[in-house]
Amino acid sequence: MFDHLLLLSRTGLVALAILTPPLCAHAQEASEIVPGLQRNVVFSEYSPLSRSTEIARRALSPLANVEVARFSAQLRPQAVDLTQESFSVYVPSKHPVRGYALLVFIPPWEDARLPPGWSGALDENGAIFVSAAKSGNEENVIDRRIPLALLGAANIMLRYPVDPERVYIGGFSGGARIAMRTALAYPDLFRGALLNAGSDPLGSAEALLPPDDLFAQFQSSTRLVYVTGTDDSVNIQRDMVSRDSMTAWCVFGTRVESMLKVGHDTATSYSLRRALSTLEQRPPVDPEKVSTCRAHLAREVAADLRRVTDLIERDKPHDAWRLLTKLDNRYGGLAAAESIQLEQRIGSSR
């Protein structure tokens, strides 16, 4: 394994590395595809979407990216060595004419396993399942969990005829929270997210907003399905907070799939089947509703950033810095250019 460069930014520790360029591969012919569960699968292809500078741009805050840029020349070439990683892959018995769906699954546990009862739902929906080992809650998010999910998606899409409009990310418990964060950062790859008993509110350190162009795509086209047991009271409450935050941030493509008399557990076969079907429906979002909401958000961002400018002009750099770091987590990439300019102004006034 390659050593990782740890960058101590003003917003925390960030572990990063740059991935190698993609290699060429071709999807298998239908006659060559063998359905069923494959364990200990080793992949070899890297994607430009998985480069750590790209992950940083999408998934970290603007101020964290300032630190990344300062150390970029020292970064190692890879975040993970795929020859040392393994994945579990389930290929459904059904081969849809328009191409497979794909569910990239981020687990809370360390091994790569297919949750019990999921194979039937995957078969019915023609969905390939892929999950990485050593991608559980104990692993680093930026250095392992997100890149492993991206690499799982990239390699499956190279090996199998996958419909790019049916590529989803999901997870259970802590893995669902990372799936949500990954969906935010990569709406151009993942068309929806299955949040199984785990979610966070937007505009927090756990769910940082990406640059505005990506967030606009997330708002307009990404579909989220919350799948939680009715007896899982903690996550039922967290889902409510998360969904309320989605509405506040102009994200309207959310649905709920409650599992009656189920606690903190993975989705039942029935609920997974319904969730996958819901992800595929993707009804159009009212563009006028989104546009009006986004305009309101833009005014809110501008007003809060003016508060930082006012503190700088009143010669209160420390107060300005405290407010800017707070807004850096709240608005993330939506205020990227302005946050960086303000950071520079504060630095020059100290």
Image: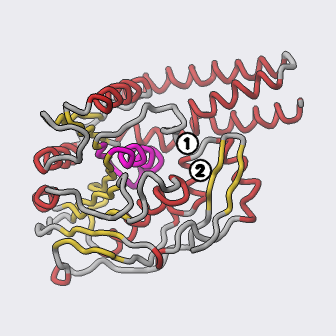
Please say if 133 is above or below 236.
below
**Amino acid type at image mark 2:** Arg
Q: Quadrant of residue 120?
A: bottom left
Name the secondary structure under disc 2. helix
The stretch in magenta equals: 173-195
| Residue 193 is covered by the magenta coloring | yes
Name the secondary structure under disc 1. loop
Q: Quadrant of the N terminus?
A: bottom right
Q: Which mark is residue 220?
A: none
Give the residue at mark 1: 211
**Amino acid type at image mark 1:** Pro
| Residue 184 is covered by the magenta coloring | yes
Instruction: State the residue at coordinates (47%, 40%).
Output: 215
> Where's residue 25, x and y in %?
39, 80
As drawn, is 286 to the left or to the right of 140? left
Q: Quadrant of the C terminus?
A: top right
Give the residue at mark 2: 57
Q: Are dots 2 and 1 in contact, CB under 8 Å?
A: yes
Instruction: State the residue at coordinates (69%, 24%).
Output: 323
Instruction: State the residue at coordinates (58%, 70%).
Output: 78
Instruction: State the residue at coordinates (20%, 46%).
Output: 267
Please say if 40 is above or below 195.
below
As drawn, is 264 to the left or to the right of 319? left
Asked whether the viewer can see residue 289, the reply is: no
Q: Quadrant of residue 229?
A: top left
